[in-house]
Image (cartoon, grey):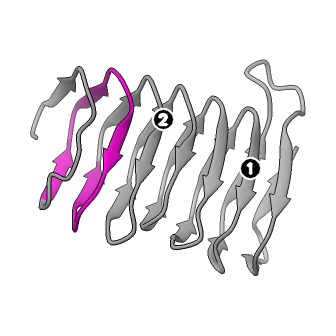
């Protein structure tokens, strides 16, 4: 996709490579499944939940805004900003590398032994006040300059 797209429903099992250079709007939940590689070089807006399944790769190079929960369960590399206006659930099969900023308004839950934070994880409300649950259930690597803030 060169200029972006709008979807009214779920984007299930596209099995292939997708790149967003513009604005990609999912007006519901967005499920990335199969052996899909999705590279976001633009703005990805999701009005529901954003779910990635085991076997997928999501690379964020600009901005992802999720009105619901963000639930990665595949490979996820973040080089810019991700906002989950509800909960961020790092699932057991996921391999997450955060090099910039992950923001969750309701809380953060890590169930992956492959969670690597080299950036910032911020658990806050929309107004910037501390809030939300921090829960870590697996090994967690926090780099020497990385931050976790509530």
Instruction: Decide whether the magenta segment is chiefly helix, strand or loop.
Output: strand
Q: Which mark is residue 50?
A: none
Residue 38 image position (x, y, % from top left): 26, 55
In three-dimensional space, the C-alpha distance between marks 2 and 1, rounded to whole angstroms, equals 15 Å
**Screen quadrant of the N terminus:** top left
Check the image and report above or below for 89 versus 87.
below
Q: Which mark is residue 49?
A: 2
Where disc 1 sits, the SS reads strand
> In percent of the image, x 16 and y 27: which residue is there?
5
> In percent of the image, x 75 and y 76: which residue is there?
140
**In this rendering, the label closer to the viewer, 2 or 1:** 2
Neighbor class of circle 1 (other Cα within 10 Å; few <14, some 14-19, many 20+) is: many
Per the image, is 95 magenta?
A: no
Residue 26 image position (x, y, % from top left): 31, 27
Per the image, is 27 magenta?
A: yes
Residue 131 image position (x, y, % from top left): 88, 33
Q: Which mark is residue 108?
A: 1
Q: Quadrant of residue 141?
A: bottom right
Residue range in magenta is: 17-40
């Amino acid at each position: 996709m060169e200029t972006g797209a709008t979807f009214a429903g779920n984007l299930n099992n596209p099995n292939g490579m997708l790149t967003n250079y513009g604005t990609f709007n999912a007006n519901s939940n967005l499920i990335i499944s199969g052996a899909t590689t999705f590279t976001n070089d633009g703005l990805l807006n999701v009005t529901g939940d954003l779910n990635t399944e085991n076997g997928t790769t999501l690379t964020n190079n600009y901005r992802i805004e999720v009105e619901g929960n963000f639930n990665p369960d595949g490979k996820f590399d973040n080089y810019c900003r991700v906002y989950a206006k509800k909960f961020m659930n790092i699932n057991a099969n996921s391999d997450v590398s955060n090099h910039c900023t992950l923001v969750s308004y309701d809380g953060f839950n890590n169930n992956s032994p492959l969670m690597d934070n080299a950036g910032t994880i911020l658990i806050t409300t929309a107004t910037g006040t501390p809030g939300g649950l921090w829960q870590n259930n697996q090994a967690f690597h926090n780099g020497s300059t990385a931050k976790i803030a509530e």
